[in-house]
Amino acid sequence: MKKLIIAIALMTLFGSLAYGQKKMTVEQTLMKMEQEMTDGVIKGELSAYDKYAADSAVFTDPGGMLTNKAQSMAMFKAGDLKIESSKIDGMKVQMFGNTAVVTFTSMDKGMYKGKDISGQYRWTDVFVKMGGKWKLVAGQGTPIMQQ
């Protein structure tokens, strides 16, 4: 009888723990994806970026240069673009059906082709749900001028 009571207590405990775990919201999922891509770029690991960015994605960098996913990945792999650190702040997600716009600022330390690009930036990324998965389809970074 004692074993039965312990078994029921354990099933109740683990059942309530599993029930209490909530599924991440779309907003939380997109924020996590943004952070994973940033963390990967800092480490020189592009698997999250490759996974989350659509093959047809386009990006306008803070200097105004337009690149696609393959070109962006090539810059990182070649070492032309190196991000040493990035602190993301104020991330917001706006939903429009199967499209989401993510905005945030970052304080970055990095180099592009030997030139210091450290500073504060504002980012706008557009995600679209395709085939049941969220994909980054466009992004733009703008330097925030110090006053």
Image (spheres, rainbow, N blue to C red):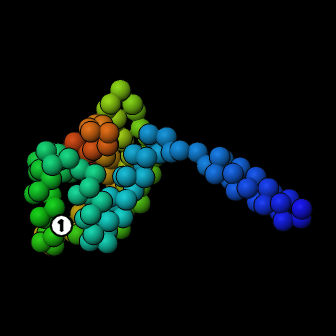
Q: Is residue 2 left or right of residue 122?
A: right
Q: Residue at x 71, y 49 (%)?
A: 16
Q: Is residue 58 left or right of residue 13?
A: left
Q: From the viewer's side, name the closer residue of 12 and 56.
A: 12
Q: Residue furthest right?
A: 1
The residue to which callout 1 is attached is: 76
Q: Residues within 10 Å of mark 1 (few under 14, many from 20)?
A: some
Residue 135 percent across, percent down from the top left: 27, 44
Amino acid of disc 1:
Phe
Provide the secondary structure element on which disc 1 rests.
Answer: helix
Residue at point 36%, 42% (across, down): 103
Please give the name of the residue rendered at 34% of the width and 35% of the height, measured from the top-left corner: 100
Q: Nearer the viewer, residue 118 or 128?
A: 128
Q: Is residue 82 visible?
A: yes
How far across and down, in percent of the image, does residue 36 sit?
Answer: 37, 59
Q: Looking at this view, name the residue that lies furthest to the front.
A: 1
Q: What x and y, as percent, mark residue 110?
A: 27, 68
73 over 32 or under it: above or below? below
- Quarter of the image containing the N terminus? bottom right
The image shows residue 86, relative to residue 43, as above or below, that is above
Question: Residue 110, can we see it?
Answer: no
Residue 6 point in image, percent of width and height:
83, 62
Q: Is 128 on the left-hand or right-hand side of 107?
A: left
